[in-house]
């Protein structure tokens, strides 16, 4: 739902605030399709251990 996703990007302390806090700028544009074009590998676990 485009309006819901747009509203979520603009919540206080959310994505827009995080980008602007470090001096960046961001534009939220509503669309029926979302493409994720960049991913980041998760950091290796430092303290967590798998449950057996």
Image: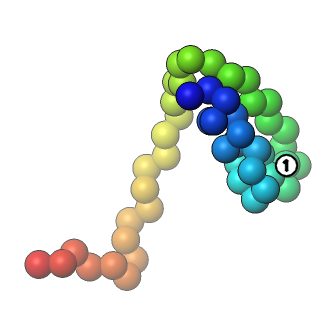
Q: Examine the image and state in which quarter residue 25 appears.
A: top right
Image vertical order of residue 29 relative to residue 17, above or below: above
Q: Report the residue at 18% width, 78% height from top.
A: 51
Quarter the N terminus occupies: top right
Which residue is outermost to the right?
A: 23
Q: Examine the image and state in which quarter residue 2 appears.
A: top right
Query: Is residue 14 or residue 36 the one in the foreground?
Result: 14
Left or right position of 11 against 49? right
Expressed as whole percent of the image width and height from the top left, the position of residue 16 reads 77, 46
Q: Report the residue at 49% width, 46% height from top.
A: 40
Asked if one can make out residue 37 in the rendered structure from this viewpoint, the answer is no
Left or right position of 12 against 34? right
Q: Secondary structure at mark 1?
A: helix
Q: Report the residue at 75% width, 50% height from top.
A: 11
Asked if one can make out residue 8 in the rendered structure from this viewpoint, the answer is yes
Which residue is outermost to the left?
A: 52
Expressed as whole percent of the image width and height from the top left, the position of residue 24 reads 84, 43
Q: Report the residue at 63% width, 36% height from top.
A: 4
Which residue is denoted by mark 1 in the rendering? Answer: 20
Expressed as whole percent of the image width and height from the top left, the position of residue 7 reads 71, 39
């Amino acid at each position: 739902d485009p309006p819901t996703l747009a509203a979520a990007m603009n919540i206080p302390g959310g994505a827009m605030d995080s980008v602007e806090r470090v001096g960046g700028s961001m534009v939220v544009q509503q669309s029926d399709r979302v493409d994720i074009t960049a991913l980041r590998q998760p950091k290796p676990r430092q303290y967590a251990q798998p449950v057996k």
